[in-house]
Structure formats: structure tokens, C-alpha cells
Amino acid sequence: MNKLKFGKIDIKKVVIACFLVIALVLQFAFLSYLFKALTPEDDKKDENVIMSYTSSGNFDYKVFLKQNDFINEEYLGPGEAYILDLIDHVKINSLYSFSSTEKTNVTGTNKVVAKLVVYYRESSDKTGNPEILKKENVLEEKVVNFNDKLYSTVGTYDLYLTDYLKTLKEFQNQVKISVDGYLEISSETRFNGVVGGATYTDSYSNTLKIPLSSSVIRIDSSKSNEKTNKVYEGDLVKTNKTVMSYIVIANIVVFIIICVLLKKLFMFTNKSEYDRALEKILKGYDDIIVNTSTILDVEKYKLIEIDEFKEILNLSRELLLPIMNYEVEKGKETWFYVVKDDILYRYIISEDRLKKVKNEKGKNKEKEKYKTDNS
């Protein structure tokens, strides 16, 4: 193995090595990015939180009564027992609120739905009885759009139970079996948010149930729990799918570049200038070069030495003759020649010749520099 001589540093090796270092740094950065994207759970720690946010909501309602001789109030408040036949309508307020620790851009929808659910009356356990009918009516669907820390929305709806009770009775008369039913009011908010470049998706829902099969009913409106969530730095990594695809492609490209640079660096390190020059000729013009293992008798021919390979190449094409190739000394000297009648055209590539040409080029550069400096 040749020892490195600092006085004769190959500029090509230095350039390739620099590009290789840059490519390796980029490769490491891309792999780190992909690793974070594929294992975001590792970053879900308090110190990696970008933002915390809370969604909450509930139903507030008043039960308005028909005119009757028993109850003088216009309406009754939440949490009481109500006589189903005396209910005129239920006024419902649906509330939803959002709060966050950072300003965030949120878009989504808030949907309030009234759904009639009818089920077989098989046992006293209503939760275990199979449902046989569902009818859904969208009371309101509105867009949620804000860029702030706080947001809230309120919707007010008057629910007249007459139509729902009529549907329940008609269905029971049709199937000729005992059925029960209730009216379920649900509010669902779905949204997408952006904070600090990271995106997140979430939803929040709560429900209210009004029984329709008993003479005296209680409305089930248990207070919904707040829902708290966090956005982490790991979410920033996996946010943009387009960016992720570019990162994957860039990672592959950089890996290919690293392989090419390693190959070139290895080639420059282990091959002499003679080997590289010979390999360049043999690879570029293998279609017109004929390898031979027999040396011809030069004394029988009139010898014409050729200084550049392109000259013997042009000669071969003009004469429509192949270029013969013979390696005189392994790793040191090779002949390329064309024979025409008694004339031998020969181009020699050798270590000594390459060194001589390199020295001459160096001297010419020094002369040109000297002339430039003194002009």
C-alpha cells in the first residue's frame, strides 16, 4: 500500500472526501428525522409539549309544558321528573368550548343531531335490548374556524316530542310487538388544528337522552367530562406527508451518492494513474479495440509513434481497421496499434510517459503564470 505523501496530495481525493462527509451528515440528519417520524411516542414527554388544549361541552335545557290544571309554571328546569303527556317541547342549549395554552389555527365542524332509537322491550335492562329502528335528524351543522387560544359556540334548539312519539306508536302498531324508545341528542365537534408547524386532529362529543316510553320520565344529561390533549414535537415531524415523502426520496438519493463517492474514493485510492488511464480507454472504446496476447515483431514494420490516443482512434476509423491492444508489462506499459501494410502506427501508455506528460503540463502552467505575473 502506498504511503500518503503530503507533498503530493491528490486534489480529487480531497474533493471526493469532502463531498462524502457532507453526504454522510445529510444522511444522518434524514435518518434522524425519519426515526422520529416512525417512533413519535418516544418524544411524548412534558419537555417536548408544544401545546396543551382542552375541549368541553354540555347540554342545558328547559322543559316547557302544555297548559294544564296541575302545574302553573311555564317550564321546569333540569334534573326534575316530567310527565310525558304534559311536555310541549324541550328547549336545549348545546355548548362547546375550546381552550389552549398557545394560539392555534383550528378548522372543523360542530354537528348537533336528534336521533330516535327504538328497541325491543325484552327485559327491564334497556341497555341489553337490541335496537330495531333509528331515525336521525340533523338539527344544525356549522363550521368551526378560529385562530386563537379560546373558542366557544352555543346552539339553541326547540324539540317538539309529538312527531317522535307519533313515529314510535306507528312503528309499534305496524310490527304488533311491544317496543320502547328514546330520543338521543348528540353534539359532535371534529376539528383539525395547526400550531408551531405541527398539525393535530381531534373530536369531542356529548349526548342527552329523553325517554319516550314511560309516563313519567327523567332526562339523562350527565355532565360530560373535559377532554385534555397535547401536541408534541413528534407531531411536528410527522405533520406534512408531502415533506415526509420528499425526505424519503432525499434519503435514498443521498445513500446512492454516498455509495458512488465511496466507490470513486476507493478507486482513486487503490488504482494508479496508469490503471485509471488504461481503464478509461478500454471502457470507452471496447467496440473497436482487440486484445491480443501475442506481441508483433516491430522490426518488420515502418514504425510511426502516435502521441495521443484520439489520433490513433481517428486513424482506425479512417482505415476501417481495429486497434490492437497488447500489455507489454503488467500494470506499467500497454501498446495500442494499427497495422496497415508495412506501416505500424503505435500509441504507448505507460507510467513513465504519464509522469512525463504530467511534468510537462506542470512546467507549462508555471511558464504561463510567470508570463502573466510579468506582463
Image (cartoon, helix red, strand yellow):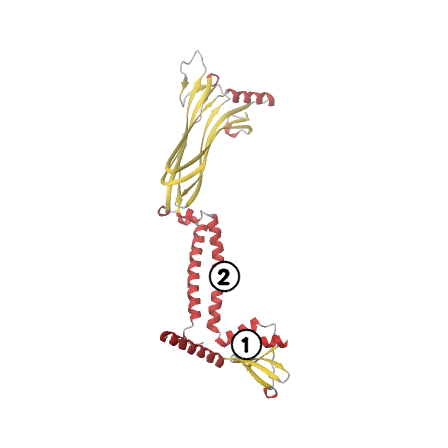
Which sits in the foreground, 143 or 369? 369
Whether residue 346 is visible:
yes
Residue at image mark 2: 256
**Could you say where residue 35 lies in the image, as x and y percent from the top left?**
44, 53
Which label was assigned to residue 309? 1
Which residue reaches farthest top? 69
Q: Amino acid at mark 2?
A: Ile
Pointer 1: residues within 10 angstroms few (<14), some, or many (20+)? some
- Residue at (44, 55) in percent of width and height: 30
Is 31 situated above or below 92? below
**Could you say where residue 21 lies in the image, as x and y percent from the top left?**
42, 63
Q: Nearer the viewer, mark 2 or mark 1?
A: 1
Q: Kindly state the secondary structure of the residue where label 2 is placed.
A: helix
Compute the Cα span from label 2 to label 1: 33 Å
Is 260 situated above or below 341? above
Count of numbered circles in the view: 2
N-terminal-most mark, 2 or 1: 2
Q: Kindly state the secondary structure of the residue where label 1 is placed.
A: helix
Is 154 situated above or below 6? above
**Could you say where residue 242 lies in the image, as x and y percent from the top left?**
48, 49
Which sits in the foreground, 180 or 166? 166
Location of residue 334 by image quarter: bottom right
- Residue at (47, 26) in percent of width and height: 209
Location of residue 300 by image quarter: bottom right
Which label was assigned to residue 203? none
